[in-house]
Image (tube, grey):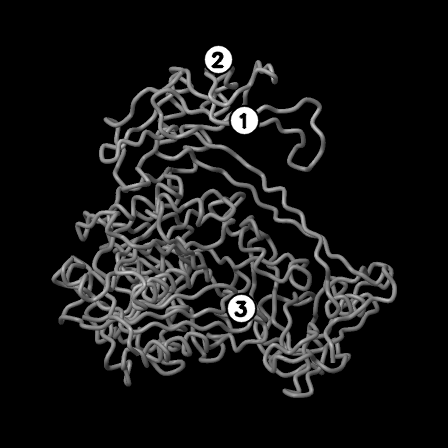
C-alpha cells in the first residue's frame, strides 16, 4: 500500500499557521563593548593584532581564531580611517523580497592597517566610478547621534 | 574492536553565569584557552574539533555552530557539530572519541557552549517549540509541564514524597559550593528551603530546578601514544553509548528512562563492565531537576527501580559515600548551560580520577566513573564511561 | 583546577535596564504554514465534528491517537481509521502556576496525560483538566471531554475545552 495520497479537492489541503514568539538581546561581548565604545566616544576604529601570527582583526576581537591567542589591550591598535574597497554590490530588494525605492550600496572594506575586511554601507556613490581597489574613507555619524553600534559608522565613501 | 584507545588529556571551562557579557564565541574561546593551557598544547597540535551546542534559538544565531567555530579553535580544521538537546554534552565526547579511535585523527578538541540569556522574554520560551505544533502548542504549554508530569509519574509509581527528592537538590547545591565555576552553590541549603520555595508546576518547585545559565567547557582528546606524551595521567574513554526513544512523549512510561538504560548497556558492554554498581566508583548523571538524578541513576542500573531515593536518604550518594553521585554539584548547583552542562560532568570525572578535584575530591582513589546526559524531547540518553 | 576556570563576566538584569552594557535587540520574524498531513488533517476534521479519531496498525495492533499514517515501531503504513471515545483516565498531571514566559498565574493550569478509552493502553494524549479542584486531582481519575459548542469548533485540539472528572 502506497503512502502517497492525492487530494480530491484542493480545499481538503489543510494548513496550520504558527510562529516563534521570541526575540533576542545580544551583548556586544568583551571585545565588542570596547570597540563600540571607542567608536561612540572617540570616533576611533580599533583593530587587534595577534602577537603570534600578526593577523590584524577589525573589529578588534578577544582572541585570534588562527592560534587561540588572547588579544589583550596591548594588542589593540587604531586602523583606518581610510581603506581599500575589496568588493561591492547594489542591493535592490529587502529581506521580504520587496523592491527598494533606491538601491542600497554595500561594500567590503579593508581599512588601512587591517588584515580582515569589514562590511558596511557605501554612501555618496557615483555608480559608474565604483571600482574594486579604489580608496574609501569612513564617514561617522555626529557625536551626539552615536550610540555604540556599528551603525555609528554612517557609511564608507569613495575618495 | 580494532580501534585505538582514546584519552582525555586536558580540560578547561568558563564560570557558569546567569548572563554573560561575553558573546557565545568568546565563551567558547575562554573554555578552549583553558583546556589548551591545562595540557600545555597549542591549537596547531589539534587535528579536528567537535562542537556540541543546543538550540540555535538560545544564542539567537542561525547555524550557531558555524558561527562559534572560530571561538572553538576550528579555523581551517575538520569540524562537526552534534546536537541532541541536553544530551549533547555527553554525546560530544563520544563523537570526539570516534574521530580519534577510528585512526582518522590523533587529537580532537571537544567544545560545548551555550548562551541562554539572549532569549527574550525568557529562555523558557525557546522550549515552546518542543511541543507538537498542531496537537499540543494550541494548549499553551510550557516546558515545566513535561517535567512536572514526569516527576509526578515517578513519585506516584513509587509513593515518594517531595522530601525524598529534595535531598538531591540539597546534596548537589552543597557540593557545588566547592566548585569554582558554580552559579548556585550553597553550603547551607536545607530540605526545608526546597519545600518552602515557590511552586512552579506542582510537584516542581523553584529549588528543584537547575538555573538558566551561560557557559562553555572544552576537553582535549588524544590517541594512546600521543596521550602518554602529553600527560602522565591520561583518563581513558572506556565506553560510549547513546539511544533515542519516541518523540511521542505521552506514549512513554514516564516513570523510567528506558533510553538511558539502553545507552548505558552499550557503554558498559564496551567498557567490559558486568556489575555497574560495583565497578563504577563515581557517577555524574544529568540532574536538571532533582528527581532526574534519581530517575537516571535507575536507568544507569546503579540502583534498582524505585531504590535511588532510599540510597540518597542513606547517604550512599554523598561525596564520602559508597557511590558518590554528582560530586561536582551537578546542574542543580553548578548551573545548566544546556550543552556545556554535560561536558562539565565529563571534565569533573577527568579531574576526580586524576585526584585534581580539590575540595570536591572523592576519597579512596576512584578508578572509574560514568557520566550521562539527557535531552531532546526528553528522549535521548547519552552515556560515557571513563577510567584510569 | 581553579586556575582552569576562566573569569567569565556575569551581568545583572539591571546592567541591561540601565544600559550599562551595549546590546542589540533583534526580533525573529519567523512565521510558518505547516501542511497538516493526512493523519492530522483527519484528526482536526474529526475534532471539528466533535469526535476523536485514531489509526490502527494490524501488526502491533496499537490504536494510535493522534493518528499516524505509518507505525514508527513496525515501520510500515498503518491500516485503518478507528474512532476512540472522549473519555479516559488521567495517567499523570501537574498544577502549573506559570505561563510559557514565566509570568505567574493566580489559578493553576492543570495539564494532564490522558489515556483515552478505545486507544491503546499507554497511548496518552496531552490536554488540560477543568471544572475540578486542583487539590482533588488524582492519577487514575476518570475524565470526560468537555467540547466547545459546534459553532465554535474550528478543527483544533482546543475544540475540546478541557477534560473534567466523571462523577
Q: Are marks 1 and 3 in contact (CB under 8 Å)?
A: no
Q: Is residue B222 above or below residue B244?
A: above
Q: Earlier in the sequence, mark 2 or mark 1?
A: 1
Q: Which residue is mark 2?
A: A144
Of the numbered discs in the image, which one, if any, rests on residue A88? 1
Q: Are marks 3 and 2 in contact (CB under 8 Å)?
A: no
Q: Is residue C126 above or below residue A116?
A: below
Q: Which residue is mark 3?
A: B149
Graded by Cα atoms within 10 Å as few (under 14), some (14 to 19) or many (20 or more), the crowding at tag 1 reads some
Instruction: Check if mark 1 and mark 3 are on a common chain.
Output: no
Q: Are marks 2 and 1 in contact (CB under 8 Å)?
A: no
Instruction: Check if mark 3 and mark 2 are on a common chain.
Output: no
The chain that hosts pointer 3 is: B
The chain that hosts pointer 2 is: A
* x and y percentages locating residue B362 in the rendered image: 18, 66
Q: Quadrant of residue B5?
A: bottom left
* x and y percentages locating residue B18 in the rendered image: 39, 45
**Lateral position of residue C117 relative to residue B300, left or right:** right
**Lateral position of residue A32 relative to residue B146, left or right:** left
**Residue pictured at 69% horizontal, 36% vertical:** A97
Amino acid at each position: 500500500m502506497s503512502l502517497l495520497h492525492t487530494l480530491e479537492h484542493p480545499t481538503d489541503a489543510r494548513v496550520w499557521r504558527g510562529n516563534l514568539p521570541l526575540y533576542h538581546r545580544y551583548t556586544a561581548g568583551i571585545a565588542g563593548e570596547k570597540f563600540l565604545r571607542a567608536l561612540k566616544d572617540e570616533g576611533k576604529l580599533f583593530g587587534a593584532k595577534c602577537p603570534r601570527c600578526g593577523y590584524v582583526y577589525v573589529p578588534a576581537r578577544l582572541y585570534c581564531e588562527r592560534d587561540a591567542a588572547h588579544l589583550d589591550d596591548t594588542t589593540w591598535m587604531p586602523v583606518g580611517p581610510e581603506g581599500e574597497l575589496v568588493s561591492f554590490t547594489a542591493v535592490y530588494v529587502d529581506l521580504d523580497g520587496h523592491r527598494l525605492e533606491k538601491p542600497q550600496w554595500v561594500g567590503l572594506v579593508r581599512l588601512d592597517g587591517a588584515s580582515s575586511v569589514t562590511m558596511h554601507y557605501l554612501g555618496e556613490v557615483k555608480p559608474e566610478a565604483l571600482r574594486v581597489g579604489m580608496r574609501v574613507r569612513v564617514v561617522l555619524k555626529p557625536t551626539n547621534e552615536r550610540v555604540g553600534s556599528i551603525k555609528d559608522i554612517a557609511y564608507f565613501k569613495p575618495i | 574492536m580494532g580501534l585505538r584507545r582514546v584519552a582525555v588529556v586536558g580540560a578547561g571551562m568558563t564560570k557558569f553565569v546567569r548572563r554573560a557579557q561575553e558573546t557565545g564565541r568568546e565563551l567558547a574561546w575562554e573554555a578552549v584557552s583553558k583546556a589548551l593551557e591545562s595540557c600545555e598544547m597549542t591549537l596547531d597540535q589539534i587535528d579536528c574539533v567537535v562542537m556540541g551546542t543546543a538550540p540555535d534559538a538560545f544564542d539567537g544565531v542561525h547555524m550557531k555552530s558555524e558561527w562559534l567555530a572560530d571561538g572553538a579553535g576550528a579555523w581551517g580544521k575538520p569540524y562537526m557539530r552534534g546536537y541532541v538537546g541536553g544530551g549533547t554534552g555527553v554525546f560530544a565526547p563520544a563523537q570526539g572519541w570516534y574521530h580519534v579511535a577510528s585512526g582518522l585523527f590523533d587529537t580532537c578538541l571537544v567544545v560545548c557552549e551555550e548562551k541562554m540569556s539572549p532569549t527574550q522574554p525568557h529562555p523558557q520560551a525557546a522550549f515552546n517549540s518542543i511541543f507538537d505544533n498542531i496537537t499540543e502548542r494550541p494548549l499553551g504549554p510550557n516546558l515545566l509541564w513535561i517535567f512536572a508530569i514526569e516527576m509526578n509519574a515517578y513519585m506516584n509509581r513509587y509513593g515518594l514524597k517531595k522530601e525524598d527528592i529534595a535531598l538531591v537538590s540539597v546534596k548537589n547545591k552543597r557540593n557545588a559550593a566547592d566548585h569554582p565555576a558554580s552559579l548556585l552553590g550553597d553550603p547551607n541549603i536545607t530540605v526545608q528551603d526546597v519545600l518552602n520555595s515557590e511552586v512552579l508546576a506542582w510537584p516542581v518547585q523553584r529549588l528543584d530546578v537547575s538555573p538558566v545559565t551561560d557557559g562553555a567547557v572544552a576537553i582535549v582528546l588524544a590517541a594512546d601514544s600521543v596521550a602518554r606524551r602529553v600527560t602522565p595521567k591520561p583518563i581513558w574513554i572506556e565506553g560510549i553509548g547513546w539511544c533515542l526513544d519516541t518523540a511521542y512523549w505521552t506514549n512513554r512510561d514516564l516513570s523510567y528512562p528506558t533510553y538511558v538504560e539502553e545507552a548505558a548497556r552499550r557503554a558498559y558492554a564496551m567498557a567490559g563492565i558486568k556489575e555497574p554498581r560495583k565497578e563504577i566508583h563515581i557517577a555524574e548523571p544529568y540532574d536538571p531537576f532533582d528527581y532526574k538524578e534519581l530517575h537516571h541513576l535507575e536507568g544507569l542500573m546503579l540502583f534498582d527501580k524505585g531504590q535511588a531515593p532510599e540510597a540518597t536518604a542513606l547517604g550512599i550518594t554523598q561525596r564520602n559515600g559508597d557511590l558518590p553521585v554528582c560530586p561536582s554539584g551537578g546542574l542543580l548547583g553548578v548551573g545548566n548551560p544546556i550543552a556545556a552542562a554535560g561536558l562539565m560532568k565529563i571534565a569533573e570525572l577527568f579531574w576526580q580520577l586524576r585526584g585534581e578535584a580539590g575540595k570536591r575530591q572523592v576519597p579512596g582513589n576512584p578508578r572509574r566513573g560514568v557520566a550521562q546526559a539527557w535531552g531532546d524531547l526528553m528522549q535521548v540518553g547519552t552515556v560515557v564511561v571513563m577510567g584510569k | 583546577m581553579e586556575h582552569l576556570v576562566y573569569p567569565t563576566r556575569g551581568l545583572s538584569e539591571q546592567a541591561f535596564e540601565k544600559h550599562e552594557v551595549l546590546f542589540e535587540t533583534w526580533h525573529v520574524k519567523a512565521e510558518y504554514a505547516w501542511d497538516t498531513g493526512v493523519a492530522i488533517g483527519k484528526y482536526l476534521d474529526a475534532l471539528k465534528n466533535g469526535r476523536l479519531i485514531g489509526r490502527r496498525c494490524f501488526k502491533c495492533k496499537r490504536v494510535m491517537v493522534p493518528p499516524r499514517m505509518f507505525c514508527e515501531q513496525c515501520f510500515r503504513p498503518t491500516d485503518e481509521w478507528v474512532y476512540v471515545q472522549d473519555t479516559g483516565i488521567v495517567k499523570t498531571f501537574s498544577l502549573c502556576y506559570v505561563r510559557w514566559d514565566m509570568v505567574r498565574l493566580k489559578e493553576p493550569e492543570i495539564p494532564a496525560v490522558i489515556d483515552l478509552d478505545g486507544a491503546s493502553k499507554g497511548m496518552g494524549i496531552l490536554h488540560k483538566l477543568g471544572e475540578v479542584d486542583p487539590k482533588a486531582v488524582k492519577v487514575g481519575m476518570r475524565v470526560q471531554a468537555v467540547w466547545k459548542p459546534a459553532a465554535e469548533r474550528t478543527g483544533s485540539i482546543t475544540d475540546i475545552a478541557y477534560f473534567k472528572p466523571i462523577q
